[in-house]
Structures are given as C-alpha cells and as structure tokens.
Image (tube, rainbow, N blue to C red):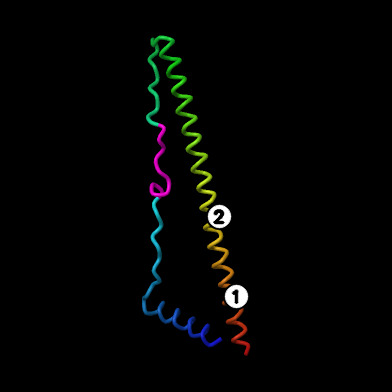
Amino acid sequence: MKLVTRAADLLIASAFAGATPAVAQAPQAQDLFPKHTCGELPEFPRKLAPDSQRRSFERQLKEYGDCVRAYVEKSNAALNEQRKAVQGVIDAYNGHLTKWQAEREAAKSN
C-alpha cells in the first residue's frame, strides 16, 4: 500500500516540477487512410455532345461512384475497428484507475 501512496507523491511532485509525461503523437488522417484510387471524376459532356459521349460519361460516372462507395465502406470498417481498439484502451485505463483509487482509499482507512 505504501507503494501506491509513494507513486501518487511522485506524480504530484513531477507535476509541480513542470515535468510532463511523454505523449505519443497521433498519426495524421492521411497516414491512416490512403487516398482513393478511383481516378479523376469524368468530365461532363457539353450540351451538344453526341449520345455515345453522354452514355460513356454516365458509365464512367457510375464506375467512379461505385469505386468511391467501396472506398468509403472500407474506410468506415477500418474506423470502426479503430474505435473498438481505442475504447478497449480507455476501458482498461479506467478499470486500472478505479482499482488504484479503491486501493488508495483502503490504504487511507488503515
């Protein structure tokens, strides 16, 4: 129990001394999710463009839209997995703090 109190004293002392714990730098969004590989948006045909050009545009636009939707679905699935992992870390940390506080309270009452 003395170790817990000693650790708390060290934390408080380091806070007053201006020491801060090392914090990992969060990765940037572009590092987590690569840019989509769907290419460029198809160019809208002019008003007087032939029907074949319009049909080609519609086909290219559908392919582009399908590609973007697949990219979004894949990215959302990865985000959900990351959220689960982060929540697990938060839950473990909160559980540890709750246990530590209970031990500290028990040590105070002794």
Q: Is residue 18 left or right of residue 98?
A: left
Dot 1: element: helix
Can you say which quadrant of the picture contains the N terminus?
A: bottom right
Q: Nearer the viewer, residue 11 or 24?
A: 24
Which residue does the numbered mark 1 point to in the structure image? 99
Which residue does the numbered mark 2 point to in the structure image? 84
Overall secondary structure of the magenta stretch? loop
Within-10-Å neighbours for mark 2: few <14, some 14–19, many 20+: few
Name which residue type carries label 1: Lys
Residue 56 image-quadrant placement: top left
**In percent of the image, x 44 and y 82: which residue is there?**
10
| Residue 86, placed above or below residue 95 | above
- Give the extent of the magenta segment: 29-38
Q: Nearer the viewer, residue 46 or 42?
A: 42
Rendered location of residue 51, percent (x, y): 44, 10
Name which residue type carries label 2: Lys
Rendered location of residue 14, percent (x, y): 40, 79
